[in-house]
Amino acid sequence: FQDELIKTNIIEKTPLHYLKLIENIDAYIVMEPLEDPSIRNNVPKEKLDAYTKSISPLRDVIYGFKEEYGPGKKWCYAAWPSKKAAKFYNIDYDMFERFIVDGMSIPSEKITRIVKKVGEKFENAKKVYVTDEFGTDFWVSVEDRAKILDNGILSDEQIALGDLGGNLPSGEVFFPPHEKQGEGKIFVPLTKERYTHKILKNVELTFKNGKLVLDKVTADSNLDALIEAFKQREELDKINKVPDLRTYNVAELGIGCNPLITKAIGYILTDEKIKGSVHVAFGFNKSFGGTSTSQMHWDFVTAAQANITVEYKDGSIKSIMENGKLISE
């Protein structure tokens, strides 16, 4: 990226040998490839845009974005700790290692019990309302949408749905909400843009009719990285001739369930699993029961003090989580 002799017109070309390899594999497994996430912080924007464009056809194949590649490949993306990454995320290495290694090592029976207990609260749910003391206040509709219990094991039900992969550590319950419904604000203490790896702090996002209102997004740092990311994915979606542009539409509602992950650091593979947090993603969700195809999928995680109220299809309303803690019957 830093070599001036390597131009953007070269970077934006998809390696055909790699594309053919991806087309002919059965499963795609990745261990966190970057030892030091900061190496991308100062990459020229035009080169990162070119890189994003180059991998777009690969993502089409892996995730089945285009009909001819459906339903996609089985995949797994596993987190892995390094001391350089811990320094980048400003976290003690031992804690970083605990979040990832211990977070993955929870016995399957235990994490399954946890996600089932949370998932039961959403049986026959119609709308989900989320608030917290930091300004989060939104609702989305999950009526008759799939409910996915992420315990780290890919179930037959998930495969039938088209959900062919997951990341590790596991530990969340998530849904593809109705993409053109829902509104409110989400406060996000910490997040990271996927390609520049720039950290954003105290982000506030507003969405209406299920769609992110980009010009109302605020952040204490690197707001430009967020805006550029959405605009660049929108451009890619237009290039890919997506019939119904969904770059900005709500794509996922998730509830973190991993008891060993307790702090947001900006690393989405652990942040979205924090017990007591809620996350909302915008963009792609077709592979897990939604209707949106997009090169965008960015999860925005609340603080771990979420309050959740569920409105059920029979008209009843029940508070199921208070200050990040599940309410017992």
Image (cartoon, rainbow, N blue to C red):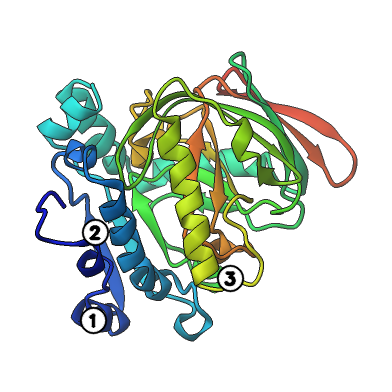
Q: Is residue 133 above or below residue 9?
A: above
In this view, the residue in front, 116 or 292, is 292
Q: Residues within 10 Å of mark 2 (few under 14, many from 20)?
A: few
Q: Amino acid at mark 3?
A: Val
Q: Name the residue beneath numbered marker 3.
A: 242
Residue 300, horizontal then vertical, whole percent = 50, 37
Determine the CA span between mark 1 and mark 2.
20 Å
Q: How many marks?
A: 3
Image quarter hosting the C terminus: top right
SS class, disc 1? helix
Q: Name the residue beneath numbered marker 2.
A: 30
Q: Amino acid at mark 2?
A: Val
> Residue at (45%, 39%) from the top-left corner?
226
> Residue at (47%, 63%) from the top-left corner?
236
SS class, disc 2? strand
Q: Residues within 10 Å of mark 3 (few under 14, many from 20)?
A: some
Residue 47, horizontal then vertical, whole percent = 26, 54
Instruction: Answer with the quarter of the image where residue 322 lies.
Output: top right
Q: Is residue 37 above or below residue 30?
A: above
Tell me which label, 1 or 2, sits earlier in the chain.
Answer: 1
Q: Amino acid at mark 1?
A: Leu
Determine the CA span between mark 3 and mark 1.
23 Å
In this view, the residue in front, 18 or 150, is 18
Does the rendering let one see residue 227?
A: yes
> Residue at (59%, 23%) from the top-left corner?
306
Does the rendering let one see residue 113?
A: no
Residue 253, horizontal then vertical, whole percent = 60, 44
Q: Residues within 10 Å of mark 1 (few under 14, many from 20)?
A: few
